[in-house]
Structure formats: structure tokens, C-alpha cells
Image (tube, rainbow, N blue to C red):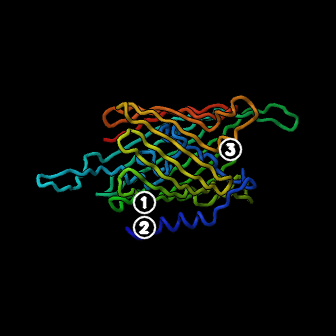
Amino acid sequence: MRKLVLFSAILIAGVAITARADNENAGKSAYSFLKVGVSARAQAMGGAMVALADDEYSAFYNPAGLGRLVPITEVEDQYGDWHEVEGDIDNFFAASYNNYVADIQSGYLTYIKRQGYSGMLGFAVDYFNYGSFDRTDANNAHLGTFTASDIAIGATYGQRASKNLYWGLTAKFIYQKLEDYSSDGAALDAGIIYILGDDRTSIGLSARNIGVQLKGLTENHKDPLPTSVHAGVAHALQGLPVNFSGQVDYPFDYDISFKAGVEFTGIDPLFLRAGWDSSGKDYETGSSRDNLGGFSGGFGYAWKNYHFDYSYSSFADLGNSHRISISGGF
């Protein structure tokens, strides 16, 4: 177990050391859909989930968070001693739908199964449909239409290594279809979450999309993957029903960005959320809507073991994104 945790840490550190972040690399990576968040809760909080990851969508943001789903609680016995007790929920699921900009539609589906006392194994599908496009010849004559889509299929294992330490790894296969052309690739994600002694503060670190394009859209060309490193902190205020989360994103193919989010949990079973992503500046066009770019918000509702969430994200003049999510355990 310690070797696997160490491997995850070394893998993330190695990616961080070799990472480059500058505008010269913008647009040079394949499978940009892998950068788009999948959870309504996370996106309502600006995507700042690397340290807060603790739900069914954790595999996307930080695979270590999957281990936090393990149903273990502490109870006090008649002698005043505290003991860990296993819960009775062994299966989890989540599904989300994203009405993205430019009429792009996407969805995410995952199933997670408990493995032993401290592990969780999950499988997920992340799908993007870009709609149909007009096909024309050199003289602009209409020759029909064609479609484009992306899909990533992944398997994640997350584990509670100790009371305060969690780690996780994801392996995924990526496939892209554009008219009669296709490409595919393979990637790994790795993550660690450490909870401080106050049980209210967590530190998260993850590396995503470490891999290669196995086959390009053309025979003699392959693109790099959108590899990135993420580090953040989450904190629950003492005496107040508020969670704060912040993180730094360090992508290989673009500038460093900052995310921040807040979650208010004091109106049980309703949750209110708001967030900000500094990359919103990239959507500025000089219009009056520029100030909205990068801001997000949303709410959630809990019923028994199920959660329903909605988020709204602004991309300034490019448009808005609406996500709905459902998750639960049984």
C-alpha cells in the first residue's frame, strides 16, 4: 500500500517538474474535452475540487477522492472508546448531462463498487457529441453533413491508506471520431488527498491525462495529450456550515489558472454553491458580459442516499453552460 501511495506521489511530482505552461502550446493538445468538468456540484464551485473530492464524481477531479466514499464511521462504545464501523452502502452511481456552448452536448456515467475494507473500484464513461456539420467542396457546394464525437472510458481505484491519507489511480482509453477519421489514446490519472488533524482541512494533489496518442487522425501525425497538474486546499469552517475550496491548475498546454469555490450547507437538505475560475479572462471580447466570464453558481438537493445538483457557468459572449447531475448509493 505504501509503495502505491509513493508511486502516485512520484508520478504527480514528475509530471509537475516537466510541465510547461505557456500560450505557445495552446491548441496543440488532442482531446480537449478531457479538460471539461463533469459534475454540477464541482462546476458550480468553479471546478475547485482537487482537495474537496469526496463524491461519486471524484475519479474525474482527483481519483484519491474515490477512497473517501468508503462507508466507515466512528462510534463510541460504552467505555468511551471510539471504534471504526463499516457502513452498509457498497454500490454508488452517478450520471450527469451538460448543455455546453455552441450546442455541444456531453454526458458522464459512472458506477463504483466497494472493494474490501478500504478500497473503491469505479468505471466511468465521458462522452461528447459536437453535432452535425455541413460538408462542402472547394466551390462551396453542399455535399451533405458529417458528425464529430469524443469518448473516454476509464477504470479507477481509490483507497483509504490511513485515517488521514487517500490515494487513487485511473487508467482510461480515449477515442475520437471526425467524419471518416478517427484517433485513439491512453492515459493515466493519479491523485493524493491528505486530511489534517483538525478533520476540517484537506490538501489535494493530482495529475491528469498522463499518456500518449496511440493513433492520430492522420497516419503520420500524433498530438500530445492535455496533461495537467492540480494542487489545492479545502476547509470547512468551524461552527459554520460553509466549505471553502481553492486550487491552482498547471496545464502543459496553457497558462496557470486559479479556481475557488464556496458551498453553504446550512439549509438541509438544500446546498447553495458559487465559484470562480480565472481562465474566464480567456473569453473576454470587449463586451458588457466580460465580467461574468469564469463565474459559476448552482444548488443541490439531498434525499435519502441520493443527490440532485444543478450548475450554471458563464463563458461571457461565448454563451453559458448548464449541468444537471444525480448521484447516490445503495
Residue 131 in view, yes or no = no
- At which x and y percent is residue 89? 29, 45
Q: Quadrant of residue 146?
A: top right
Q: Image quadrant for the N terminus?
A: bottom left
Q: Is residue 206 above or below residue 105?
A: below
Say which residue label 1 marks: 167
The three-letter amino acid code for the residue at tag 2 is: Leu
Say which residue label 2 marks: 4
Tell whether 78 sits left or right of 241: left
Residue 94 in view, yes or no = yes
Q: Residue at x 33, y 56 (%)?
A: 115
Q: Residues within 10 Å of mark 1 (few under 14, many from 20)?
A: many
Q: Secondary structure under badge 3? A: strand
Say which residue label 3 marks: 178
The three-letter amino acid code for the residue at tag 1 is: Trp
Report how far apart the C-alphas of labels 3 and 1 lie in the structure. 36 Å
